[in-house]
Image (cartoon, rainbow, N blue to C red):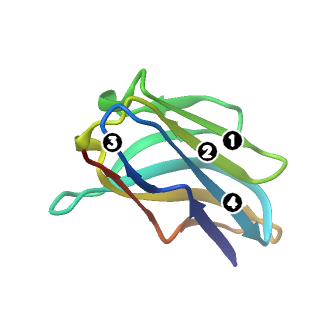
Amino acid sequence: QVHLVESGGGLVQPGGSLRLSCAASGSIFSINNMGWYRQAPGKERELVASMSSSGSSRYVDSVKGRFTISRDNAKNTMTLQMNSLEPEDTAVYFCNAYVTHISRSMAVYWGQGTQVTVSS
């Protein structure tokens, strides 16, 4: 079993910054893809940013140039630096990881989510 724990959410004014972190622990051999998703009230969950184990990243168009994803493969951690935040970024942010277990089986895991609110 694998657990993902997010931290770093909160309330910030428009134009401000937040840094989200995700730490994975458990029966991990390797983590293939890791990503951040978000879900705003009344909307579907959407992929915000993701990064492969080789460091290849992608972003949803609305956050390009403002958000930066990074990960530390040795520590099984991932961060999302969010700058120039806008009210439209308000959502619950979820960490996601595609894990290869020590047993070599694979599964996708989700964190519990962390609230990000952008408001004046």
Q: Is tag 3's residue or tag 2's residue first in the polypeptide sequence?
A: 3
Q: Which residue is mark 3?
A: 13
| Mark 1 burial class by Cα count in 10 Å: few <14, some 14-19, many 20+ | many
User: How far is the residue under mark 4 from the one under mark 3?
Assistant: 26 Å
Residue 100 is situated, as x and y percent measured from the top left of the image, at 72, 61
Q: Is residue 15 left or right of residue 55?
A: left
Q: Earlier in the sequence, mark 4 or mark 3?
A: 3
In front here: 108 or 8?
8
Judged from the image, the secondary structure of the residue bearing numbered disc 3 is loop
**Label 1 with label 2: CB-CB less than 8 Å:** yes
Disc 4, SS: strand
Q: Is residue 49 above or below residue 1?
A: above
Please report the residue visible at 20 percent of the width from the left and 62 percent of the height from the top.
Answer: 41
Contact, mark 3 vs mark 1 (Cβ under 8 Å): no
- Residue hosting label 1: 71
Crowding at label 2, few (<14), some or many (≥20) Cα neighbours within 10 Å? many
Q: Of the residues tagged 4 and 3, which is closer to the observer?
A: 3
Instruction: List the residue tagged with mark 2.
Output: 79
Q: Viewed as shown, does residue 65 lie left or right of 34?
A: left
Q: Nearer the viewer, residue 96 or 92?
A: 92
**Disc 2 on helix, strand or loop?**
strand
Indicate whether 116 appears above or below 105. Answer: above
Disc 3 crowd rating (10 Å Cα; few below 14, some 14-19, many 20+) is some
Spatial CA span between label 3 and label 2: 20 Å
Q: Nearer the viewer, mark 3 or mark 2?
A: 3
Q: Earlier in the sequence, mark 1 or mark 4?
A: 4
Residue at label 4? 23
Residue at the image position 43 percent from the left and 57 percent from the top: 10
Residue 12 % position (x, y): 38, 46
